[in-house]
Amino acid sequence: METIIICENLMKIYKTSEIEVIALQGLDLRVKRGEMLAIIGSSGSGKTTLLNILGGLVEPSAGKIVIDGIDLSKISDKDNCKYKSETVGFIWQNSEKNLIPYLTAIENIEMVMKLRGNHDRKKAEQLLQSVGLINKKNSKLKQLSGGEQQRVAIAIGISSNPKILLADEPTGSVDSATASDIMNVFRRLQKESDLTIIIVTHDNKLAAKVDRVVLIRDGRTSTEYIKKEDDQNDYLDVDIDFEMTNKSHDEYAVLDNVGRLQIPSDLMERAGLNGKDRVKLVFEDGNITIQNCNGEK
């Protein structure tokens, strides 16, 4: 499958007159076209910064980022505006960022289309149909539930026929049943249009339902969980505890371009290692093993 997103040694440093914060420090990531990917990590790990860089909203401080053949580090402001309006769609957690409260569902979609100069009532209705809300097209936001508002936001996000849909905590303000409905909408859109979907989430149960989960720790890609092939048809309506994700995903540590590797804390504990221990790397039988100072593997 073709790679649509390439991030290599991506760095982002926020500076003020008094402090310097490193949000990303050498992050590597590749995303395949048509993949549904979840990005997880603790607060401050860099996941939202990464999403904003992918969306062309924030410039990286260093590194390489190429999306659908477009090098975002080299494009002009004009081309960046075109990229944001044509290549990517956005969905935010808070409906205030997505929707205008005094407009109806269909008017919200039409407003965005008018701003792009391609207003089409029929297409707006088709978009609402695709997210299961055509019967609420004339309802104002206060007449819609939180989940329905978010589905209108999804319709707006795909109104430009983007190749990539970026969602920042899209289910953060709804209950678990509604969150599952929203994920089902994402999955249907992915299958129907080969849409690449990247979701930043704190909801581990939702993260366990996507094709691949990337864990960001300290501004770098640390661990990946990849969906097992034999479970592909079962997971949309299954309530999975991410701590038991080995039932549906295989876990991998990620080796970056300069050879750095973050070992999950539970494996460190089981091996009797801490962050200050020296270890020995041994190549044997085509594999690299890590040995602690006592010779244990």
Image: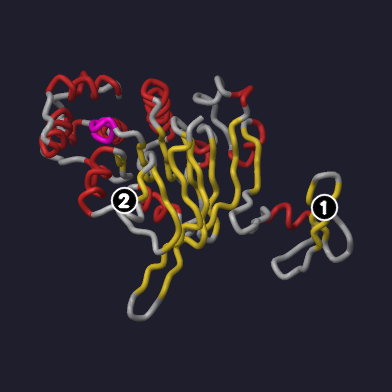
User: In this view of the protein, which residue sits in the foreground, 6 or 219?
Assistant: 6
Q: Magenta region: which residues? A: 155-161
Query: Which image quarter holds the C terminus?
Result: bottom right
**Rendered residue at 31%/44% (across/down):** 92
- Secondary structure beneath label 2: loop
Q: Is residue 127 left or right of residue 52?
A: left
**Residue 103 placement, left or right of 11:** left
The spot of residue 41 in percent (x, y) is: 51, 52
Please identify the quarter of the rendering in which residue 117 is found.
top left
Residue corresponding to mark 2: 56
Q: Residue at x 34, y 34 (%)?
A: 163
What's the amino acid at mark 1? Phe
Please say if 137 is above or below 57.
Answer: above
Residue type at tag 2: Gly
- x and y percentages locating residue 221 in the rendered image: 55, 52
Mark found first going from the N terminus, 1 or 2: 2
Q: Is residue 31 magenta?
A: no
Q: Which residue, as the protein is rendered here, is positioned at the far bottom?
A: 18
Find numbered disc 1 in the image and state the secondary structure of the residue it sits on.
strand
Say which of 189 and 66 sits in front: 66
Count of marks overlaid on the render:
2
Q: Which residue is mark 1?
A: 283
Q: Is residue 297 above or below residue 178?
A: below
In which quarter of the view is residue 147 placed?
top left
Q: Nearer the viewer, residue 236 or 130?
A: 130
160 inside magenta stretch: yes
Few, some or many C-alpha atoms within 10 Å of disc 2 (few <14, some 14-19, many ≥20)? some
